[in-house]
C-alpha cells in the first residue's frame, strides 16, 4: 500500500482529470483556428499537439485507474492538498502572490522589503532585528547591482 | 583557421571579458554548490539581466556560470551529502564518505582537478567534432529538422522522468506554449482568446524563471528544516602521483562524458552515473571499497560531468538541439541575442562558435584556482538557512522577469507558471521537457509545415520521403528506438535476454 501511495500520490487523479479537460479545451480551440485548409495550415500542428496531450492524459489515467480507486474523491482532495500545499508551502505561496500583486501599488522597493522581512520571520530564518539588517543589506546590494550593472529600470 | 584562433583568444585578450568569465565561474561554483540553487535557474535568470548587453559579454558571464555551476555541485555533495546539482549525485557516493573520514579537502581537490581535466578534454572534442558535424548537418532537409526536434524532446522527456507519458505530455505542453501568439506563416492569432497582450506570445524566459526558479523554491520548502553537518577541511591539493595514477580513469571517464553529452537529451547527471558505474565495474583494486570513500568514485563522475559540457554543446551548436535543460536555456539565450544555433551557425557566424569555445576554455582555466580556494568560507556559506535563501531566490526571479520587458505582465506569468510547475513537479512531471518544448517547438512546427508543403500536403508522400532518404530514415528509426526503449515491454525483453546470457 505504501508503495502505491509513493508512486501515485493522492491528488494525482484530480490533476490528471484537470489536464485531460485542459487538453480537450486545447483541441477544441485548435480546431477553431481559422483557415484549417491543409496539413500545413496554422491549425494543423496545434491539433497534433492537442491530440498528443489528450492521448497522454488518457494513457496515464487508464494505466493507473485501479491504483487511483484506492482513494475516495473527497479523501483524495483532502490528502492531495495536504501533500502539495502543507501549511508552510501554502502560506509562503500566499505571501509570494501578495508580494507580486503589491508590486504595482506599493512600488518595488517597499513591497520587496515587506516581502523579505515577512518571509524571514515566517520561515523562522532570523529575528526581527536581523531580518531588518539582512533586508537592508540585500536591497542595497540589489539596488547597485541591478540598477547600475544590469541596467534594470524599476517602477 | 587564423580567424578562428583570433576569435578563440578574444576573451583572453580583453580584461573586461576575462573578468566577466572569472566572475561567472566564481558565482557558478557557489550557485551550483548551494542546494536549492541550480545552474539552469541561474542561467535562465541571467538571460533576462544580460538582455541589453553586448552578446560577447553576455556569453562570457553565462559560460563562466555554466562551467562553474556544473563543478560546484560536487562541493555540497562532498561536504553535506546533498548534491548541489543533479550532475553531482554520483560524486556524493564516495565524496561524502571521504568527508566523514576527514578527507573532505582531498576529495574537493580531486573533484576540482578531475573536473578541469575533463572540461578541457570535452572542449577539445567540441572544437574538433562540431565543425565536422555542422558540415554534415548542412545536408538536412526540413523533415530532418522536424525529426531531430522530436528526438530532442523525446529523449529528455523519457530520460528525465518516471513516466514516458508524463515526459511526452510535458514536452507537448512546452510546444503548445511556444505556439501562443501570432502564427509566423499567416500572422493569424493562435490561443490568444482575443487578448492583444497574448498576440506577441508569452516570453519564454518568464516561463523558464517560473518553472525553474519559483517552483524549485516551493519544492525546497518541503525540507526547510534539514540542517547541514559541519566538516573539517585539511589537505586540499592532490599530489601529482595521485593524479598520474588515475590518469587512465580520467581519460576513460572524460570519453564517457563527451559521448553521453553529445547524445541529444542526455546530460551531466547521466554521464556522471555512467562513469561511476563503469569505474566501479572496471577497477579491481580501488583506494578504498566503492561507497566507502574511494578516490576513484569522486574522480570518475566529476571528470565525466565536466567533459559533458563540451559534448552537450556539440548537438546544441551544430544541430540546434540541446543536450539537457541547461543547454536548452543557453540555446534560448543565443536566440535572444539574435544568433541561430544549427548548421548555419558555422557558416553565418563561425566567429561566435570559436568565441564560445574560447570562453569555455577560459572558464575551465579559472575553475582550477577558484575551485581550490575559498573552501573554508564556502563551508560557512552552504550552511545558510533555506529560510533566508528562498525569499531571496523569489525576489531575484521577480527582478529577472521584470527586466525582460520592464513589465509586470511577465511577472504575473512567471508566478502562474511557477505555481503550476510546482504542482506538476509534485506529481512527477519534469520541467526540462517543458522548456525543451518551448525552445524546440518553433523549429519543429516550422519544419513540419515546410516539409508538408514540399510534398504538397500528401501524407503518404511525407512518410515516403522519410523512408526514401537514408538520413531521414536514420533519424526516424532513432526516434522509434528512443520510444520503444522506454516501454516496459522492452525492459522485459532485455531482462529476459540478460537472464539467458
Image (cartoon, rainbow, N blue to C red):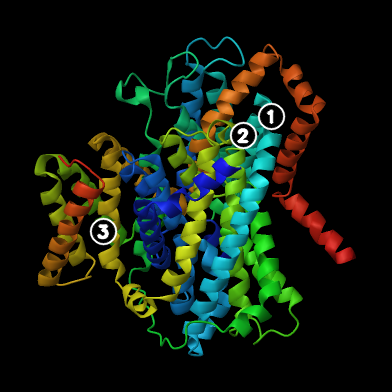
Residues packed near mark 3 inside 10 Å, few (<14), some (14 to 19) or many (20 plus)? many
Q: Is residue A8 left or right of residue B492?
A: left
**In front here: B47 or B415?**
B47
Asked if marks 3 and 2 fall on the same chain, the answer is yes
Q: Residue at x 54, y 42 (%)?
A: B353
CA gap, disc 2 to disc 1? 9 Å
Q: Chain of mark 1?
A: B
Whichever of labels 2 and 1 marks the residue nearer the N terminus, that label is: 1
Residue bearing mark 1? B140
Q: CA distance from mark 3 to mark 2?
A: 40 Å
Label 1: element kind:
loop
Quarter assignment of residue B448? top right
Q: Quadrant of residue B345?
A: top right
User: Which labelled disc corresponds to residue B468?
Assistant: none
Quadrant location, the C terminus of chain B: bottom right
Query: At which x and y percent is residue B92?
Result: 53, 74
Task: Report which residue position mark 3 lands on.
Answer: B392
Q: Are marks 2 and 1 in contact (CB under 8 Å)?
A: yes
* Image side of residue B203 versus residue A88, left or right: right
Could you tell me which chain the residue with mark 2 belongs to? B
Amino acid at each position: 500500500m505504501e508503495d502505491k501511495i509513493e508512486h501515485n500520490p493522492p491528488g494525482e487523479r484530480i490533476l490528471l482529470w484537470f489536464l485531460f479537460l485542459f487538453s480537450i479545451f486545447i483541441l477544441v480551440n485548435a480546431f477553431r483556428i481559422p483557415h484549417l485548409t491543409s496539413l500545413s495550415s496554422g491549425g494543423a500542428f496545434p491539433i497534433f499537439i492537442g491530440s498528443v496531450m489528450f492521448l497522454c492524459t488518457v494513457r496515464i489515467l487508464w494505466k493507473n485507474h485501479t491504483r487511483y480507486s484506492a482513494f475516495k474523491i473527497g479523501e483524495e482532495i483532502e490528502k492531495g492538498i495536504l501533500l502539495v500545499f502543507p501549511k508552510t508551502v501554502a502560506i509562503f505561496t500566499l505571501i509570494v502572490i501578495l508580494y507580486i500583486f503589491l508590486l504595482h501599488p506599493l512600488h518595488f522597493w517597499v513591497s520587496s522589503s515587506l516581502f523579505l522581512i515577512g518571509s524571514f520571520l515566517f520561515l523562522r530564518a532570523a529575528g526581527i532585528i536581523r531580518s531588518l539588517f539582512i533586508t537592508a543589506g540585500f536591497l542595497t546590494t540589489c539596488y547597485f547591482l541591478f540598477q547600475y550593472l544590469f541596467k534594470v529600470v524599476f517602477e | 583557421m587564423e580567424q578562428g584562433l583570433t576569435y578563440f583568444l578574444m576573451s583572453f585578450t580583453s580584461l573586461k571579458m576575462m573578468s566577466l568569465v572569472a566572475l561567472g565561474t566564481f558565482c557558478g561554483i557557489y550557485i551550483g554548490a548551494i542546494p536549492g540553487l541550480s545552474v539552469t535557474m541561474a542561467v535562465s535568470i541571467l538571460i533576462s539581466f544580460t538582455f541589453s548587453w553586448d552578446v560577447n559579454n553576455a556569453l562570457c558571464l553565462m559560460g563562466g556560470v555554466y562551467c562553474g555551476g556544473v563543478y560546484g555541485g560536487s562541493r555540497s555533495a562532498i561536504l553535506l551529502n546533498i548534491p548541489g546539482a543533479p550532475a553531482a549525485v554520483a560524486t556524493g557516493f564516495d565524496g561524502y564518505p571521504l568527508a566523514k573520514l576527514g578527507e573532505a579537502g582531498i576529495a574537493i581537490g580531486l573533484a576540482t582537478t578531475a573536473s578541469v581535466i575533463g572540461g578541457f578534454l570535452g572542449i577539445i572534442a567540441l572544437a574538433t567534432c562540431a565543425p565536422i558535424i555542422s558540415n554534415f548537418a548542412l545536408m538536412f532537409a526540413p523533415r530532418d529538422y522536424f525529426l531531430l526536434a522530436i528526438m530532442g524532446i523525446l529523449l529528455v522527456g523519457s530520460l528525465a522522468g518516471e513516466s514516458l507519458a508524463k515526459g511526452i505530455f510535458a514536452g507537448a505542453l512546452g510546444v503548445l506554449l511556444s505556439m501562443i501568439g501570432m502564427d509566423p506563416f499567416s500572422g493569424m492569432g493562435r490561443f490568444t482568446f482575443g487578448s492583444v497582450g497574448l498576440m506577441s506570445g508569452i516570453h519564454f524566459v518568464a516561463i523558464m524563471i517560473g518553472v525553474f526558479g519559483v517552483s524549485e523554491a516551493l519544492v525546497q520548502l518541503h525540507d526547510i528544516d534539514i540542517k547541514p553537518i559541519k566538516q573539517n577541511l585539511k589537505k586540499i591539493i592532490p599530489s601529482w602521483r595521485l593524479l598520474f595514477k588515475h590518469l587512465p580513469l580520467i581519460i576513460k571517464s572524460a570519453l564517457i562524458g563527451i559521448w553521453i553529452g553529445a547524445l541529444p537529451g542526455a546530460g551531466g547527471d547521466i554521464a556522471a552515473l555512467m562513469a561511476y558505474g563503469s569505474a566501479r565495474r572496471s577497477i579491481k583494486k580501488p583506494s578504498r571499497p566503492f561507497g566507502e570513500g574511494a578516490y576513484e568514485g569522486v574522480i570518475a563522475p566529476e571528470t565525466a560531468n565536466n567533459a559533458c559540457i563540451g559534448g552537450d554543446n556539440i548537438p546544441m551548436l551544430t544541430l540546434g538541439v540541446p543536450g539537457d535543460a541547461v543547454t536548452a536555456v543557453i540555446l534560448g539565450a543565443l536566440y535572444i541575442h539574435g544568433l541561430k544555433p544549427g548548421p548555419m551557425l558555422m557558416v553565418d557566424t563561425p566567429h561566435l562558435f570559436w568565441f564560445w569555445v574560447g570562453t569555455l576554455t577560459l572558464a575551465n582555466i579559472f575553475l582550477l584556482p577558484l575551485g581550490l580556494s575559498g573552501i573554508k568560507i564556502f563551508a560557512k556559506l552552504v550552511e545558510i538557512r533555506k529560510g533566508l535563501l528562498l525569499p531571496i531566490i523569489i525576489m531575484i526571479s521577480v527582478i529577472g522577469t521584470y527586466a525582460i520587458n520592464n513589465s509586470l505582465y511577465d511577472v504575473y506569468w512567471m508566478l502562474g507558471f511557477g505555481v503550476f510547475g510546482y504542482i506538476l513537479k509534485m506529481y512527477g512531471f519534469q520541467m526540462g521537457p517543458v522548456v525543451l518544448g518551448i525552445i524546440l517547438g518553433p523549429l519543429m512546427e516550422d519544419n513540419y509545415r515546410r516539409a508538408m508543403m514540399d510534398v504538397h500536403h500528401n501524407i503518404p508522400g511525407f512518410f515516403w520521403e522519410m523512408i526514401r532518404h537514408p538520413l531521414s530514415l536514420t533519424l526516424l528509426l532513432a526516434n522509434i528506438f528512443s520510444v520503444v526503449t522506454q516501454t516496459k515491454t522492452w525492459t522485459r525483453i532485455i531482462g529476459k535476454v540478460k537472464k539467458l546470457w
